[in-house]
Structure formats: C-alpha cells, structure tokens
Amino acid sequence: MKKRVFALFLALVIAVSLTALPASAAFNDVSSSDWFAQDVEDVQQYGIIIGTGGGNFSPRLTLTLGQAVTMVARTYAKANGLTIDESDNIPWYKPYVVFAVDNGIMTEGEFGSDYDAVCSRLTMAMLYCRVFPMYTKNTLNSVTKLPDLPNTAANADVYFLYEQGVLTGNDEYGTFLPYNGVSRAEAAAILNRVLNPEKRKTFVLKEKTPADSLSPFNAALTVKYQGGTAADKWYVQEGGAAAPSVADINKDGRLEIIAASRTIYCLDAATGKILWQAPSGGDASTPQGTEFGRCTSDIKIADLDKDGYDEIVTVHTRYEWSGGQSKVAVYDRNGYLRAGWPVDTPYPVRGVEIGDFENDGRSEIALMLGVGTAGVTDSAPSLYVYEPNGTIRSGWPVTSDFGFYSDSLTFCDLNGDGRKELVGLFDAEQTRAWDMYGQPVTITSGTFNGLTWNGLPVAENYDWEIFLADYARSHGGHAAGNSRTLIDLEGNIRAHRNIIGGTVGGVVAADVDGNGTIELVFACMVLDGYELMQNPGSNSYEGVAKYYSTFILNTDRTRYTNPALGFNWTQMPMDPAKIVSLDSSVIPTADIKPVVDDIDGDGYKEILYSANDGQVHCWGLNGKQNYNWPFTLCTSGSPVKEFATRPVTADLNGDGYKEVIFGTYTQTGQIASHGSLYILDCTGRVLSKTSLPYYWAYSSAITDPNGCQAAPVVADVDGDGKQEIVLHTLYSGVVVYDVG
C-alpha cells in the first residue's frame, strides 16, 4: 500500500526533517556550470545522495533501480524522522529495499528483483510519487495527454507529477519516454522539484500529431510472386472473400500460406510452391476434381487440442442445393482430415469463431448459419458449437431467428468469472450473448440489470434504447426496435425509428483505452426500422439501410464512456457517408468487421472498417474521424464502384506508427477498371497504390475484373526481417508483395 505524508505532519518535514544539512565538498565530476549542479547540491545537502565513491557523483550514469529505491527510502526516512538500519548492507542496497518494503513504499519485487538493472523513467516517477509531500500539492499545469503514455489509472502518478511541475517531458510535446532510463543528474533534478516547490516548472504542452514525427517511408510495392495456387500456367481457381492465413504449421522455422477457393492449398510462403492441396470435402489423399464448393469463410489456424501443432479450419459452401449447405473441415498440418471431420450443415455457414469457453486449453468452434425464415417458422438452429473432435457441444445448437449472414460473433468473458461467452450480431436489431451452455446471458449490473442481451435492440438513439429496455421489463424481457405500433404511440421521429441491422458487420473485444477493461466494438449498418416493417418479408435493404457505423458497448451492455479521458460513446456516429450500392450483383458486399488497433501511437485504439459507402473509415475514441480519414474510393456518382477489403494494420517501417493496408475490388460486368493494393499511413494519406496483376491467364470468357475481396495478411514470409503483404486475389491466385 502506498504511504504518503499528509498535511500537518508534513509541515515538520520542511521545518525540521528536510532542513538542509551543511554543504559537503563538491563532487569532483560536477562543475558549477553544469545545468544540474544546483539540483545535485540541494539534494546532497538533504543527505539523500552521497555519490558513487571517490568523491564522484557520476551524473551521466544511468540510474539503477537500487539507487532509485535508496533515494526514495532516504527521503521518506528524513521526512518521518526515521533511521534506516544499514548494518546488513550486502548487497549495498539491501537496507534501503528492506526499509522501503517495511514502510509500504513498495512491495517486495514490485519493480523486479534486479536492483542493479536500469530504473525506467516510469518506475522512477511511481517511486517519487510515493514520497511526494502532499501539503505542497499545487497544480501548476493542465496535462491530459502525453504523446507516448495514455492517461489511464496505471499512469496517474506520471500525470500528477506533470501537473505539479515536477516532470516536464523531453520536448515541447511532453514526451515522457516511460521505458527509457534516466541519468543520475536528471533523477536529482526531478527529486529536487519534489522536495522544493519553488523549483517546479510551469508550461503549456503542444499537442503532437503523427505528422510531426512520421518517418519518410518508401512504400513502393513489387511483386515477389503471383499465381500461388495455380495448377499450371493456364489455370488458377477463382478466389473469393475468404482471407488466407500465414503460420509455421510444420514447426520447421519456415512460414506457410494456407489459402482456399474450391481447393485448400498449403504454399511455401517464401516461394509460393504448393506443398500440398486438398479438394474441399476431401483431404490431401483425395483426387482433384471432387471439390464440394467454394471457400466462404476466412481460413482459421489454431492449436485446437493443445497438442503443440496447429489445425486448419475451413468452410466450403455449395449454394446450388436448396438454400445452400456447407462442409466444415479440420485438417492437420499435412492436409489430412482430423477424426470427426468434416461436418455437414443444413444451411450455409457465414462465419466461424474459435475460442475456449472454460479456459481448459481445448478450443471450441462456433459456426454461424444463415437459416432465413426457417429460423422463425421452423425454429431452425443457426448457431452450432463443436468440440475439437467434431462432436456438437452439449447445450448446442441454438436458434437465433433468421440467423447469421457475416462473421459477427466473438468469445469474451462478459461477467469476469473466468469463463467466456459468445456475443455479437445476427440478422436483426439486437446484439445477443450466450453462455457456454447455450443459454442467453442475463445482465447483472448497470442500466440493463436483470434483462438478457437477447431481448434488447440497439437503437441509434441511446435514450430510446433505454426506453425500450424499460418496456421490455414489463413485456416478458423483450422489446422490438422496429415495432410500428410502439413508434406511432411514442412519436414517429428519427430517434425512434433508426436501429442497427446485424445482417452484415462484426464485433471485436478489445481494451480500447488501455485501462485494463475489455469493451466490445461493433460495426454494422443502421436502418430505418419503421420503414423495414412496411415490407417485413423483403430480403432487400434498398431504401431502408441509411448508413454504416460503429458503436462500443461495455460488457454490461451499456454504452462505453470514459469521462476522465473525455470519451463518450452514448451516441454512435451518425450519417458518416451515403451508401453507394447494396446490389451484390453489381458489386459484392464489403466485409465490415471492425479492426481495432492503436495506429497513431497515442495509447488509444482506433476503429477501422470498410463499408458499402465506398470508404475506409477510421474512428478515434473522441468520436471523430481524425486527420485525413475517412479514405474515399468511390461515391454513388462514380462511373465504376470500388470497395475495400477489411483493412489490416502493421508498422511496416518500424517508426512506431501503424500503416493501414487493404485491397480493393471493382464492380462486375466490366474489365476496364481493376482492383488495387493500398498502403495508407496512420493519418489516412496514401503511401502506395499498386494495381493488381491483370489475370493469371486471360480468357475471353472472363467478364469481370481482377481484384481482391479477401483481407490481406502481413508477414515476413521469407525470414529476411522485412514484412511482405499476402493477397488472395480473384483471378491471379495468391500474390505476395515486397514493400520498399
């Protein structure tokens, strides 16, 4: 427990305990002209520093953890009129460490056990704060944001010292460099400001933007190889929206690329050579030409049974059958089916999520099915959970109305009990959550206490959503956000009409602000629920869908806010852009599952997604699209429509800022305009745009343009220390690019 010296008692500190001692001889290595000379003299006179021996102070040496603890222990002892027992002094810092622990300044091993190690600036600040004379507290500066340290509870000591004028940072922006070392001279100067209020500094920090420090970057792209998955120089299977995966599945120190169309391919990542291939529905021992269908979900790689080797999970779907059916397969590293697989599903699988409900080391596989009206009329199950051996987990499957039409669920511990739940979107206006037994999750705190996730719509207007929750309490725990009767009764206005549509979208569980708490970040479309019910049997959202947006929920389903940081997401962003097209026969629907990452290095995560509005969006936690975002590919008036893949983020040049990478695809029925590969910096500026290869082998039968619908993968495929970009394109197979 931290102990701080409080008002009345601390008056004695100035009066008695910290009264300057007679000046001792100057240190040999401290000149009166040194910027730190007065600070060293002041702190020395208090008896807090005595040098490193031989009459030297060693001002330019880096402070060690033992030295930092010693300075703090002596400060505390003098402030409290205590004596440190220095009799057991091997190693030399032992008495000070013992004293600091015994007096609650720190706990044993709190900052590590190597006291000869460098003391980081963050550790120094935390230690200094624990002996800060509270009676001298006087806020001199307003500091709410540092460029390299988020304003969270864990970093409160640092922000306190900035506000008190003890810390000033290393530049005009206040850069703290929390994990760097600090010289003994700097440590003395900072401690002197702790002890002497008149030494503290007033300042106004300049806000730093990435543009102030982005490194020059050659983002030119060159093709390393193309035609990965090609059977020969004349033929390559058509790609789709299923993203490939890159991993060392053989544990031989070399990466492999797993990509799938109608066949599953394992490629040597460095060269593109096919190591093995398996027709969908079969495995590496099955003759080619027996493929079941197209790959319709991202390739997932995970060690499902914790045997030390990864498995490969694929989904292939055949839509020619009534309503469509899927085969879900699990392969070993050599392309052979694991026991119990594949499994057949009665309706198409639209998403796969892998997680571990009970944290027992064995993963479960959640399958999201689009069942349509059969989910309502026939109670057809739409959410299945399988064990690694291919058996259906007890309590599953479950029904969720019309089912799922995108990869829109995630595993997350919603109630802090150490077990995960499945939570996310489905084809309605609600978010839903199920526990490990397939039961709806009941909310146990906050605004929605006592209700289940499964009965509550997400409304554009949060006040209306809370009203609907109150309505649900008296109506069996359920409220329909698109009830025309209720809307007419309460007022037919936008605030009561607009709700989310979970048909397309996704969710990511992430700690968005670095405070140690997980939030749920969603992206989906917003639609007019009142208009939707004019024609409830329609499969079209034309005239009903209004825009695509994002929202953030806490794990108790309330909207995310962090008042201390000025973040308030009770209102989701409204009307960011007009929808370009919803006609998938003109241009396929974008994958709008969000990507959540801190791309600008400010300690807070951004939310990125692509959408049918022809844009790549990037939202900051301030609820705005900052810098140059969003990035626009097309508008409703563009002659050729162009949408982006799901973006990925990576620091390609090692400057501490993430680049945003995505492929694009253009509308069907024309071949004049093809897709491209883009690299944007964290501010949304284009670093590189490269047209994708034309076709692997052109045929007059091809009437659609080459492009990429599947999210890219960034990996060092050849072990040269540089990252490459991997794409699975529509008509040129797997293409790998070198960067720079």
Image (cartoon, rainbow, N blue to C red):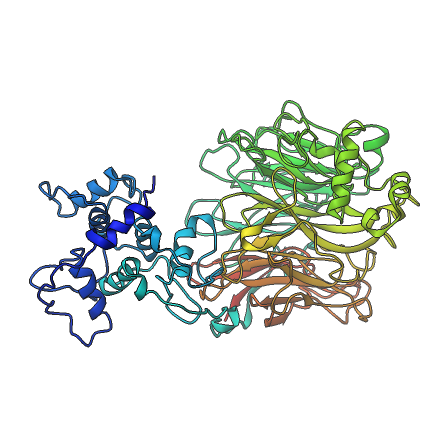
- In the image, taking residue 150 as reference, residue 65 lies left or right, namely left
Q: Residue 384, relative to residue 204: is it above or below?
A: above
Determine the residue positioned at 50% across, 38% down. 303
Residue at the spot 42% in from the left edge and 56% down from the top edge? 159
Query: Image quadrant of residue 679?
Result: bottom right
On the question of residue 707 being in view, the answer is no
Quadrant location of the N terminus? top left
Outermost residue toward the right?
A: 534
Count every numbered label the image shows and give the total. 0
Figure quadrant of residue 644: bottom right
Which one is in front, 407 or 231? 407
- At which x and y percent is residue 196? 28, 61
Residue at x-position 82% and y-position 42%? 320
Q: Is residue 430 left or right of residue 341?
A: right
Nearer to me, 582 or 173? 173
Picture coordinates of residue 706 (x, y %)? 71, 64
Q: Is residue 173 left or right of residue 672?
A: left
Q: Is residue 13 visible?
A: yes
Q: Is residue 573 left or right of residue 113?
A: right
**What residue occupies the far bottom of the structure in this picture?**
33
